[in-house]
Amino acid sequence: MNFPNQVIIREVGPREGMQIEDTPVSTEDKIRMIDMLSECSIPIIVVTSFVSPKWVPNMSDAELIARGFKNNSRTQYQALYLNAKGIERAMQTNKFNLEGVLSITASETFSKKNTNLTIEETLEKMDERIHMLKKYNISIDTIAVMTAFGCLYEGDTIPQKVINLISKTMKKAESYGECPNKILLGDTVGWANPVSTKLLIDKVQQNWPNKEIILHLHDTRGMGIANAYVGLQMGVKYFDASVGGLGGCPFSGAGKAAGNIVTEELVHMCDELGIQTGIDLEKLLKVTEEIEEILGRSLPGKVSKGGSLNFYRTKHEEY
Amino acid sequence: MNFPNQVIIREVGPREGMQIEDTPVSTEDKIRMIDMLSECSIPIIVVTSFVSPKWVPNMSDAELIARGFKNNSRTQYQALYLNAKGIERAMQTNKFNLEGVLSITASETFSKKNTNLTIEETLEKMDERIHMLKKYNISIDTIAVMTAFGCLYEGDTIPQKVINLISKTMKKAESYGECPNKILLGDTVGWANPVSTKLLIDKVQQNWPNKEIILHLHDTRGMGIANAYVGLQMGVKYFDASVGGLGGCPFSGAGKAAGNIVTEELVHMCDELGIQTGIDLEKLLKVTEEIEEILGRSLPGKVSKGGSLNFYRTKHEEY
């Protein structure tokens, strides 16, 4: 076991979850959700997306949300943006630590369908993106690989392909004097299993022993927490997760399929393994219940239904 | 990795699931469920319980179910019984391979609440049970430890306590010339985590290197599949699971909490890791959908919503 002492969990529910949510959620409820999550001392929350309301109508209230939520000094707030306009909108609210990310997709077909660019075109366009980030003084801290384990159109991703893409992107960033210190491995459609997770992490760690890995796992087929466990065993310190399992997979199961791994399941596993997250699990379980009330349906997260074990450990005498 | 080439998954949904199900399910639907599961080539199915209809009204149609389902030569059918009356009822139907099990609970409080016997009383009563099994020519093949990882009343179970209980039970069986070759570790309330799972399996394997372990895992807090993965890594070949995640935990969350690990999630993980189960996953996913229709609600199992990866691997050209 090579568990880290502490992990940093980034809450992506308000962004990834709300983005594909069918149930209309009021801006007030979205703000309340973010404030409740802040109260749990989650280290990073991705609050919203500054993208075109024409393409993503669910995110048209991004400014209102940004203005509405309470800044908590223990939490860092991020927002998604795709272009200069998005950056400017986010910056005007003065609420965010904007992350500088260079993204690339390992599957050609997925890349084309999702971004309308081939892998080669993505690499070509990267100079432009780096210029834009530099213009806004956003340092590039992360290289993100989508469909790093596989994709519905092309099947399994060969790990060496991921390594080559990271390598090319890294060189490009470095040629501009940037030094991304994190590599995000995105299991965009829930393709990873514990062995493929181990293999890819291993290869990335061998190639970049001094960079941190962010695991962005989806639980589309129920293996997400097992994959996260393998990540922990290999010393991974950064994880993305979604409260209650909010969201879903737009690529599988017509929106019925599960999305990101569930924040409270990951926090609970870390608590049980003695790995610190800084997150107040009992409060988080209440947040899931509140979000279930807002949405009027049950979410996939299991800990809020079963109760945390520390709850029983401390209460079992009265229970 | 010490993965077995093949694992034997026992389907417990028709028994554990139906036993605590609130939605009334007709005997015809229960029979159809079992027949559909047989069609998936599941090696063992626990069909029903021959227990007092006064205590478990959901199981009052045990004989009708037993008479109704079709025997499939690839499947072994088991049924639960508690006493001589149950054995006789099961035997009269001529449909079952009755398993000889000696059960014991690691938590004193849980034992008392669930069986109305202390651990000591359970051990004392075991002679009686062995006599009964011998009378009906049921050989004792399994020693089962409930709450082997922890319980809501007493917290964490100390692994050495489990070892001592297995040891005492084993000696008792052996004193009657019986040789149980399987040890079931029951995570009755979903207390295990990957590390505690590893520790207990390790201790059992050290003490009884020639016995097989059956992992009976619950997914009450979302760690079930991660725990199963650890079991596979340690060469465990026998697993209990429930189709769709049918059932729940009567001890946590007022029936809302998840129960056994989901059969199709375990089968899917095995498929992805190259471990044979003999089970037809695509058919099984359809069974989950059918059961969801029968119950009129969604079940926790995720693979039926996301689709298996082999489906996408073989269809992705047309997809």
Image (cartoon, coloured by chain):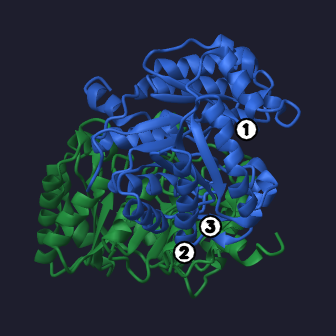
Chain colours: A blue, B green
In the picture, which quadrant includes the C terminus of chain A? top left
Chain holding disc 1: A
Query: Pointer 1: what residue?
Result: A82
Query: CB atoms at circles 2 and 3 under 8 Å apart?
Result: no
**Where residue A212 sits: x, y (%)?**
41, 48
Q: Residue at x 45, y 79 (%)?
A: B97
On the picture, is B305 further left or further right than A276? right
Tag nearer the camera, 1 or 2: 1
- In this rendering, the answer to whether B125 lies above or below B170 is above
Tag nearer the camera, 2 or 3: 2
Query: Pointer 2: what residue?
Result: B271
* Spatial separation of the CA atoms under disc 1 and disc 2: 38 Å
Q: Residue at x 71, y 53 (%)?
A: B292
Chain holding disc 3: B
| Badge 1 amino acid | Leu
* Spatial separation of the CA atoms under disc 3 and disc 1: 59 Å
Query: Pointer 3: what residue?
Result: B65
> A118 or A251: which is nearer to us?
A118
Q: Give neighbour class at mark 3: few <14, some 14-19, many 20+ (Cα, 10 Å).
A: many
**Where residue B42 sits: x, y (%)?**
56, 76
The tag earlier along the polypeptide, 2 or 3, is 3
In which quarter of the view is residue B208 placed?
bottom left
